[in-house]
Amino acid sequence: MFATCAAPARFPALPARASTPASARGSRAAAAARVGRSSRLRGVVARAADFDLDALMPDSIEGDLEGLQEEAGANFDDDGLPLDYGDVDAELAVLNASAGIVDRGAVKYRLIRLGGKEAVPALKAAGASSDAVEALLSLGPNEGAAVAFGEKTAMVHVQNGGLLVVAPDTVADKLVANANESAADLAEQCALLSLVGPDAPSLLARAGVGGVMDRPLGAHQTFGFEGRPVVASHGGAEMFDDFDKRTTTLACCNLVTDEGVAGLLWAAMTSLGAKPAGTASLEKWAETNR
């Protein structure tokens, strides 16, 4: 269903990019301003070029994520994220026994792009140990790691143009403050969807992105969807304080995509069997898996 892309290179300096108004980047809007979603899922086109994080900037919305979530019965929190779909306990059971898909948003957990000469100092200034940074720098393409920042944990993925970091908001603030021009907050460009549960690996395999969750935390692949890149990464450690580094796997795959196709991606995953779940059940899942 999905086509994987070539493995990107790592750690070159980030190219300059001009800021773009949020309205042009496809940020989620109120119901009256939403763009209608496609009536069917369109084919996936493989990308021949290396994945570029700059490509995560949609020109238009091609799927109505919030509208799809409303149709599924979502109750939204103050930040506009699905808190639940009517039964938190039932959703928790899905996360523990099969596979659920959760919209993580960009408030409590954020996506940060790091690159250039200030990336490594920023990691250390935010609380990462020298040993953790050295271990990260030794990784090859399509790898990554759970990195401790004091009591918090972030997932750090080696990607083209630098590092892609999934971090709690407090860690993200420190990274952005210390990296200066070498950091970009992708909140307005990207969506973070998580597939959670023991059936997530087989669901990804049916989508043509198998193997990600069979590898250690931080491993990732890129696939083309609707002509745009999506990063599928073995993650989840960002939800844990004092993460136990002896744990090498978690039943969580983070999908990083631009907002322009987030709704279509959500629909594709639910059509493959993922059940909608809210952030309330995800928090309970994290508590029970500590």
Image (cartoon, helix red, strand yellow):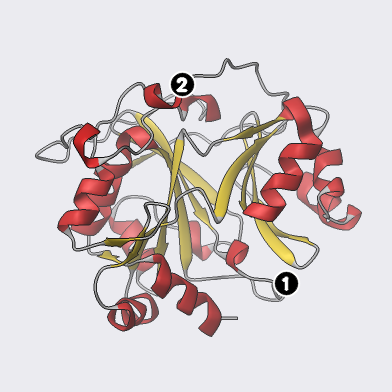
Residues tagged 1 and 2 counted as in contact (Cβ below 8 A): no
Vertical placement of residue 256 versus 205, above or below: above
Distance CA(mark 1)–CA(mark 2): 40 Å
Q: Nearer the viewer, residue 27 or 261?
A: 27
The disc, 1 or 2, on the residue closer to the chain's N-terminal end is 2
Vertical placement of residue 178 versus 278, above or below: above
At numbered mark 1, what does the secondary structure look like: helix, strand or loop? Answer: loop
**The C terminus sits in image quarter:** bottom right
Q: Nearer the viewer, residue 264 or 200?
A: 264
Vertical placement of residue 205 versus 190, above or below: below
Residue 29 on image: x %, y %:
31, 37
**Eye-nearest disc, 1 or 2:** 2
Q: Residue at x 72, y 32 (%)?
A: 11
Q: Which residue is mark 2?
A: 21
> Callout 2, which amino acid?
Pro
Q: Which residue is mark 1?
A: 245
Residue 237 on image: x %, y %:
61, 65
At numbered mark 2, what does the secondary structure look like: helix, strand or loop? Answer: loop
Q: Which mark is residue 102?
A: none
Q: Residue at x 33, y 70 (%)?
A: 99
Residue 160 on image: x %, y %:
61, 31
Q: Is residue 288 left or right of residue 163?
A: left
